[in-house]
């Protein structure tokens, strides 16, 4: 009994029988005490009745997104519990909502067993050692510059002329990092110049106006993918506000490029 008391308690919530039969036993063998719930009502009963160190909940238990209801209940009733969302359909919208609901991390099905155990144990240990300060969005972009550039359409491979090319992407990334770090609403000179030059190039190459919108949107999508990949190292307390600023600056860049495109006369 003494050994059981020292084992972190996990509430595992999933409506799929195959998942309930495979993952909980692995966690049990890895040193966790696991209780399994197959519905939202059962999970809410457990949250209100027994203490837990970790919650692992499927994103869609009975209805779409109701895993966040379980997480919300755990946050309010047991605020020290570490919360995970389990999903087979990762997307930026899911990651963003996870941030807003203060989920500590989300796991993608099919879950790699060693990764699952490590993620749960690392989060539990970090809670015991005290709160950790994550990275701001500007730092994430700066520290992952190479992977960002490789992932961006038109960056490493110039297959789409409407996408930001290597030099444009490098300049825009640097300008965006400076922009977010400076915490100002107005575009800095570097960002303004990149947007202006981008609009001119799109016009010069005879591409339609819509190419500017799609090109910058692909740049934004790459940033969202970076955030999703590094969600566990991000500063959750600032990420929502940083994302809003990032989206605001993308809109400003788009407007500047469109204006440059419209003003330039065809040769």
Image (cartoon, rainbow, N blue to C red):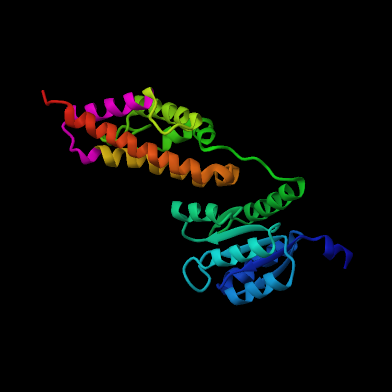
Q: Quadrant of the C terminus?
A: top left
The residue closer to the viewer here, 98 or 120, is: 98
Residue 98 lies, in percent from the top left, at 53, 55
* Residue 195 among those drawn in magenta: yes
Count the labels in the image. Answer: 0
**Any part of residue 39 in sight:** no
Q: Is residue 104 above or below residue 13?
A: above
Q: Quadrant of the N terminus?
A: bottom right
In the figure, is residue 259 to the left or right of 103? left
Quadrant of residue 266 within the rendered picture: top left
The residue stretch that appears in magenta: 190-211
Q: Is residue 114 above or below residue 210?
A: below
Residue at left offset 49%, top offset 29%: 182
Residue at left offset 55%, top offset 37%: 136
Quadrant of residue 160 within the rendered picture: top left
Residue at left offset 64%, top offset 62%: 76
In the figure, is residue 129 to the left or right of 137? right
In the figure, is residue 11 to the left or right of 210? right
**Any part of residue 6 in sight:** yes
Report the predominant secondary structure element of the magenta stretch.
helix
């Amino acid at each position: 009994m003494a050994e059981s008391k020292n084992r972190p308690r996990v509430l595992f919530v999933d409506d799929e029988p195959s998942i309930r039969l495979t993952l909980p036993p692995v966690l049990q063998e890895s040193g966790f005490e696991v209780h399994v719930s197959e519905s939202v009502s059962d999970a809410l009963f457990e949250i209100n009745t027994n203490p837990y160190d970790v919650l692992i909940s499927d994103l869609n238990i009975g209805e779409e997104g109701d895993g966040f209801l379980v997480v919300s209940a755990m946050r309010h009733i047991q605020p020290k519990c570490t919360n995970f969302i389990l999903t087979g359909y990762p997307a930026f919208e899911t990651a963003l909502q996870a941030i807003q609901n203060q989920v500590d991390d989300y796991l993608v099905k099919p879950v790699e067993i060693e990764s699952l155990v490590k993620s749960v144990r690392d989060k539990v240990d970090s809670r015991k050692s005290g709160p950790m300060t994550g990275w701001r969005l500007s730092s994430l972009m700066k520290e992952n510059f190479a992977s960002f550039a490789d992932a961006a359409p038109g960056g490493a491979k110039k297959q789409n002329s409407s996408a930001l090319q290597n030099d444009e992407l490098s300049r825009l990334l640097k300008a965006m990092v400076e922009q977010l770090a400076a915490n100002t609403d107005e575009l800095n000179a570097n960002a303004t110049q990149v947007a202006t030059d981008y609009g001119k190039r799109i016009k010069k190459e005879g591409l339609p106006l819509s190419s500017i919108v799609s090109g910058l949107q692909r740049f934004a999508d790459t940033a969202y993918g970076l955030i999703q990949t590094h969600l566990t190292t991000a500063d959750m307390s600032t990420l929502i506000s940083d994302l809003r600023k990032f989206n605001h600056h993308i809109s400003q860049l788009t407007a500047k490029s469109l204006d440059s495109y419209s003003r330039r006369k065809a040769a």
